[in-house]
Image: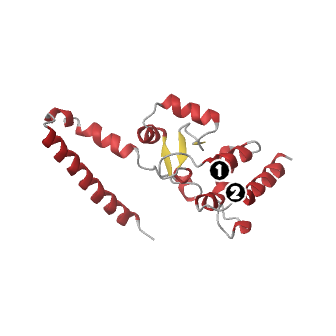
Amino acid sequence: MNTLVEQERKLMDLLARRVHQIFEEARAAGVPTDVFDDVESIARSMTAALPTSGIYDQLVGPFYDTNGLTQWWGISRQAINKAVAAGTVIACRLDGGQWVYPTWQFTDSGTVHPRLITLWSTLRAAADPWTCAVWLRSPQPELDGRSAAEWIADGHPHESVMALASADAQRWAA
């Protein structure tokens, strides 16, 4: 397993190569220097897409915050709010009112895994977002000790995990 220091080094190396490539292409294309004048804003935009950390990371995280998700998806805060209201993204609210979005729900292409949304909807019918998110990340003996999120991400049949989610949601609602 990689440490945070190793992950930071890998990310910084990859970013340095990509930024260098972009500047080489800009020079070759004759892009004016002032396009890159606001380096602080550029850095803020780049880092906004990094997962945030906090107390809930151990249970459910890491997370993207709303700024990070808007940057990654290239959409507005309002569009994110609509996705939360529609239940098409897994979102939990922190005590301060800030929304966070667990990183494990997203596919490599940035979409939310549809099977996770089905599970989320089933669980949310009976419990609050944090309870549901913890359930999705908790090891399940019936899933060979994997969490439901891992089970789905690994491509296992969703019927067994749906049965577990439905049973727990029914028990919670009782």
Going by the image, does 100 lie left or right of 174? left
Name the quadrant containing residue 129: top right
Cα gap from disc 2 to disc 1, whole angstroms? 7 Å
Residue 158 numbered tag = 2
Q: Which residue is mark 1?
A: 115
Q: How many marks?
A: 2
Number of residues whose C-alpha sits closer than 10 Å to that of mark 2, classed few (under 14), some (14–19) or many (20 or more):
some
Residue 173 location (% of width, % of height): 82, 46
Residue shown at 36%/46% (left/top)?
Answer: 47
Whether residue 172 is situated above or below residue 154 in the rendered picture:
above
Name the quadrant containing residue 139: bottom right
Circle 1 — which element?
Answer: helix
Whether residue 21 is situated above or below residue 2 in the rendered picture:
above
Query: How is colour applied across the structure in the image?
Result: secondary structure
Q: Earlier in the sequence, mark 2 or mark 1?
A: 1
Whether residue 89 is situated above or below residue 146 in the rendered picture:
above
Name the quadrant containing residue 42: top left
Circle 2 — which element?
Answer: helix
Residue shown at 26%/52% (left/top)?
Answer: 18
- Tag 1: residue type? Arg
- Tag 2: residue type? His
Residue shown at 70%/43% (left/top)?
Answer: 121
Residue 79 location (% of width, % of height): 52, 30
Q: Do residues under tags 2 and 1 come within 8 Å of each other at their CB atoms?
A: yes
> Which quadrant, please, contains the N terminus?
bottom left
Residue 127 numbered tag = none
Residue 133 location (% of width, % of height): 64, 51
